[in-house]
Amino acid sequence: MFDPDKPPTKRNRMDRDRVEPTAMTDPVDDMMEDQIWKELPEDLFEAVIARLPVASFFRFRSVCRKWDSLPTSHSFSWQCAQVPQAQPWFCTVTRGNVDTAAMYDPALQKWYHPTIPALPTNINVLPLASAGGLVCFLDIGHRSFYVCNPLTKFFKELPPRSIRFWSHVAVGMAVNEKFISSGYKIIWVGCDGEYEVYDSRTNSWTRPGSMPSSIKLPLSLNFNSQAICIDGLIYFMCSDPDGILSYNMKTGIWKQFKVPAPKHLSDHTLAACGGKILLVGLLTKNAATCVCIWELQKMTLLWKEVDRMPNVWCLEFYGKHIRMTCLGNNGLFMLSLKSKHMNRIVMYDVTKRQWVKVPRCVLPHGSKEQWVSCGTAFHPCLTNPV
């Protein structure tokens, strides 16, 4: 409160030069600013929002109902399709004291622990494949398939398969065209050669035919390896004999290729980058273990080593029984390396030939470090194209 008996204090020069914010505010300027935003063309507004970082977009959704409804807008979906694909995220199942879902954003180096209310809670579902921002889940009993956008939490249960007996299956997924708005397909294949293809445009499973006689049955599918998709071709890894099984989503043609595995190879999986087929695996000889990257030479059908984890990192694995889980495609891989007394998660960028350690995955309000048991990479999508 101002005291009339107290002499006024002398203001320094900085305070004298400082202008109060209210003195600079012009009501006419406020009206003009509101009018400018009000008349901003809708397509321009959506084009700006589509180019926001993923985390920022979901904060903006809480501003109003209109912004919250953007994921279901056809025009916004078109704007998102014009934006170059962002760095892939990782949808994983992590284990520690409890099994839980976790997503990792490599750009921000941050773990998220989302909840998807529509996913069944009475059974375990595993993320096995992805395409166009969608992730395909399969329940642990191999009975029901689900498709979900992990970011918008949009969810869909697929129709039952026509096959009435259940066995372990390998799963692949691909978009029909360049954009997910044109639909997607999912294929599952079992060791007995049975397979089915789901088409989102018809919302049904079909059995296009049977395996050609040139393919040796039963198939020795490597269920620890993810399937990869390159230009509409789905590739599965096999053993006995070592090699690759491919299926053309457009023509329905199966092919089998014998590709000898590198010596001393243990845990391994297929991966892809720039149209090239890669192999990520552990080389274990005597007591030494190292993570290596190979590229498939199409002319000779042999694996050529192109990179390996730095030796100083591999020294930590010496004498330990290491198990590896590898997720990822499009040149960015997540490797979970675990032994009895060690747990490490590492990212590898194929283009940069760069190895980066991933922050610890810890549950909210918890301290127990989780390890990645399975999962898939997916490109973050802000719309619901299911």
Image (cartoon, rainbow, N blue to C red):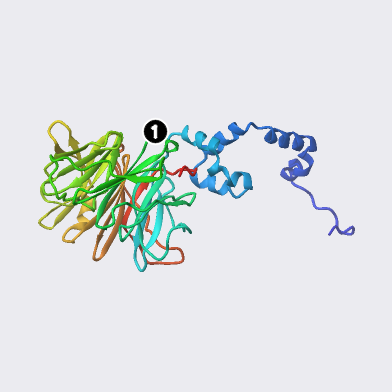
250 relative position to 192: left or right: right
Amino acid marked by disc 1: Lys
Q: Residue 372 location in percent, x, y?
A: 32, 57
Residue 106 seen in this snapshot: no
Q: Residue 76 location in percent, x, y?
A: 54, 37
Residue 367's image quarter? bottom left
Residue sticking out furthest to the right? 4
Q: Residue at x 89, y 59 (%)?
A: 5
Q: Which residue is mark 1?
A: 178
What element does badge 1 sit on?
loop
Q: Quadrant of the N terminus?
A: bottom right
Residue 41's image quarter? top right
Relative to 56, say whether 143 is above or below.
Answer: below
Q: Residue at x 89, y 57 (%)?
A: 4
Relative to 251, say whether 113 is above or below.
Answer: below
Q: Quadrant of the C terminus?
A: top left
Relative to 383, say whether 191 is above or below.
Answer: below
Instruction: Identify which residue, 172 or 355, lies in the foreground.
Output: 172
